[in-house]
Image (cartoon, rainbow, N blue to C red):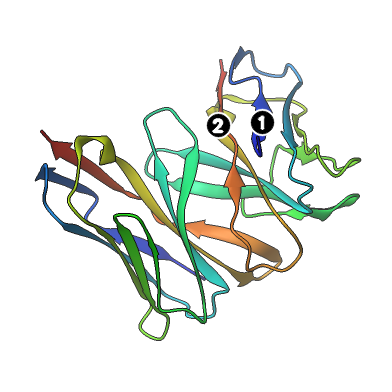
């Protein structure tokens, strides 16, 4: 089944403790990205990747890192999480660099930072 | 800066009604527009994708239209059912600043279909 998977689905952590949220897609997509969703603010892009070893900042990249060592995986790294990073996170992917393809979203990761 | 607005923010209708959800965007330089459905606590399910060169797309009881020049899209749901209850999100994709391919989302319309 074609899908985008994220792990973990739920995470409660404390301020400053490094964490990684994994994202994997099995559709051989080149384009992958991370979004966060907050009440009243909607979905906003954090980082995106056009292909392996090619990443760039989205609208709200502060406090996050990403890497794209393999085509299928695009982990989101929070080196020193803070309470304002409490949010619902979504990974997304689409087929190619051509921007006309639809994006597929993972099920989301609900992160709470205390 | 691209901004996407969805009206109404919430909508409650009786089962069986036909309804229209509205989406407007400020910058017509888009590659495509995508409608999503989000159930509480869940991910986003893509419903329809309309390319910038297209006027409408249909899938089952859903029909989405796009008027790029006026910056508007509508999602028409025919014969609504309680299972259609969800939040519907509109998103446009363009090449905005340094964020290539970024989807800009509206804040959604929360639909409730009463049996």
Question: Mark 1, chain letter?
Answer: A
Mark 2 vs 1: CB contact within 8 A: yes
Q: Position of residue B94 (x, y in %)?
A: 59, 70
Give the image location of residue B86, x and y in percent.
Answer: 31, 39
Real-space Cα distance between discs 2 and 1? Answer: 7 Å
Q: In the image, is B38 to the left or to the right of A49?
A: left
Which residue sits at x=68%, y=62%?
Answer: B99
**A90 and A112: which is toward the camera:** A90
Query: Is B36 in front, or is B59?
Result: B59
Where's residue B62, x and y in %? 32, 57
Q: Is residue A63 left or right of residue A35?
A: right
Residue furthest front as drawn: B60
Relative vertical location of residue B109 with respect to residue A19 in this rendering, above or below: below
Task: Determine the residue located farthest toward the bottom in the rendered image.
Answer: B69
Residue B107 showing in the rendered view: no
Relative to residue B21, is residue A110 depicted above or below? above
Image point 16% across, 39% down: which residue?
B113
Q: Is residue A77 visible?
A: yes
Q: Residue at x 77, y 34 (%)?
A: A75
The residue indicated by pointer 1 is: A5
Under circle 2, the secondary element is loop
Earlier in the chain: of badge 2 and badge 1, it is: 1
**Residue at 17% from the left image edge and 47% from the top image edge:** B11
Q: Secondary structure at mark 1?
A: strand
- Give the residue number, with chain letter if any, for mark 2: A107
Q: Quadrant of residue A76?
A: top right
Relative to A42, A31 lies left or right: right
Q: In the visual, does B20 lie left or right of A78?
A: left
| Residue B25 versus residue B110 in the image, above or below | below
**Residue nearest the viewer, comparing A10 with B66:** B66
Asked which quadrant contains residue A97, the reply is bottom right
Question: Are labels 2 and 1 assigned to the same chain?
Answer: yes
């Amino acid at each position: 089944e074609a899908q985008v998977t994220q792990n973990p689905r739920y995470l409660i952590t404390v301020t400053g403790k490094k964490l990684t949220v994994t994202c994997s897609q099995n559709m051989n997509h080149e384009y992958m990205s991370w979004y966060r969703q907050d009440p009243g603010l909607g979905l906003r892009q954090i980082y995106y990747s056009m292909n392996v070893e090619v990443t760039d900042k989205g609208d709200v990249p502060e406090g996050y890192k990403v890497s794209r060592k393999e085509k299928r995986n695009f982990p989101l790294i929070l080196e020193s999480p803070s309470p304002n990073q409490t949010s619902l996170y979504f990974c997304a992917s689409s087929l190619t660099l051509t921007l006309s393809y639809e994006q597929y979203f993972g099920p989301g990761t609900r992160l709470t930072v205390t | 800066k691209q901004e996407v607005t969805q009206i109404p923010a919430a909508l409650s209708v009786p089962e069986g009604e036909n309804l229209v959800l509205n989406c407007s965007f400020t910058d017509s330089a888009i590659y495509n527009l995508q409608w999503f459905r989000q159930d509480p606590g869940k991910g986003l399910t893509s419903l329809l994708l309309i390319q910038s060169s297209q006027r409408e797309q249909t899938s089952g009881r859903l029909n989405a239209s796009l008027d790029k020049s006026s910056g508007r899209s509508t999602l028409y749901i025919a014969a609504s059912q309680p299972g259609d209850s969800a939040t519907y999100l509109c998103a446009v994709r363009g090449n905005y600043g340094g964020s290539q391919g970024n989807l800009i989302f509206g804040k959604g319309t929360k639909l409730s279909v009463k049996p």
